[in-house]
Amino acid sequence: MILTGRQIQEARTQGQLRIEPWRDEQLNPNSYNLRLGEDLAVYTDHELDMARPNGIEFLKIPPEGLLLQPGRLYLGRTLEYTETQGMVPMLEGRSSVGRLGLFVHVTAGFGDIGFCGYWTLEISCIQPVRIYAGVAICQIFYHTVSGAYDSYDSGKYQRNSGIQPSMLWKDFIKD
């Protein structure tokens, strides 16, 4: 089942989830809006390789916004830090953002029980679109779980503080 907005607020009060900073106006009937941070990253290599770290460069979204171009992947980060215990966090784009042809995740909208950190957004667009830091770009919602579970403890992305490029290359490391 998906938590309602009231249940999200209750779970926050009981320490099952954390969203910092919290703003009541971002709470929805069954989700919470997360905002886009001012930093973006883009890969500098034309050809990406799963088996090694790929070069990235960081950009700042200026106050007048940044025009995103189709055919380019931009990695962003939520302004909000989240922690989730005993529930599955899920991330989805807002419909108002999607109606501009802007995608906020390629495949990574599914979180793990116990995830703690900022959400790295995999941003792409259908046509050029100007984005702004601080805009409510996506929403987080929560599924309840049934039965015993193990909490997420991967060293790849847990407790991150910034934009996280792919670390799939770590799966190729042999002992």
Image (tube, grey):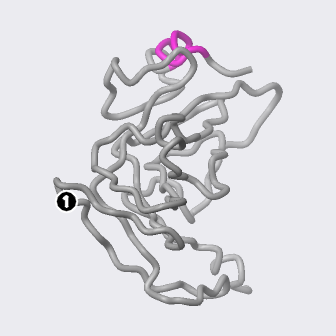
Residue 77 position, x and y percent, is 40, 54
Q: Is residue 125 above or below residue 55?
A: above
The overriding secondary structure of the stretch rendered in magenta is: helix
Residue 129 position, x and y percent, is 39, 56
Q: Is residue 110 magenta?
A: no
Q: Residues within 10 Å of mark 1 (few under 14, many from 20)?
A: few
Q: Name the quarter where the C terminus is drawn.
A: bottom right
What residue sits 56% from the left and 71% below the top? 166
Near-viewer residue (41 or 131) = 131
The outermost residue toward the right is 147
Mark 1 highlights which residue? 62
Residue 108 position, x and y percent, is 63, 54
Q: Name the quarter where the N terminus is drawn.
A: top right
Q: Is residue 162 above or below residue 34?
A: below
Near-viewer residue (26 or 19) = 26
Is 60 displayed left or right of 150 in the figure?
A: left
Is 174 displayed left or right of 131 in the figure?
A: right
Residue 34 position, x and y percent, is 42, 37
Region of the chain picked out in magenta, as a range: 4-11
Q: Looking at the picture, which amino acid does disc 1 mark? A: Pro
Which quadrant holds residue 89? top right
Is 21 displayed left or right of 106 in the figure?
A: left
What residue sits 49% from the left and 55% below the top? 121
Q: Is residue 95 above or below residue 59?
A: above
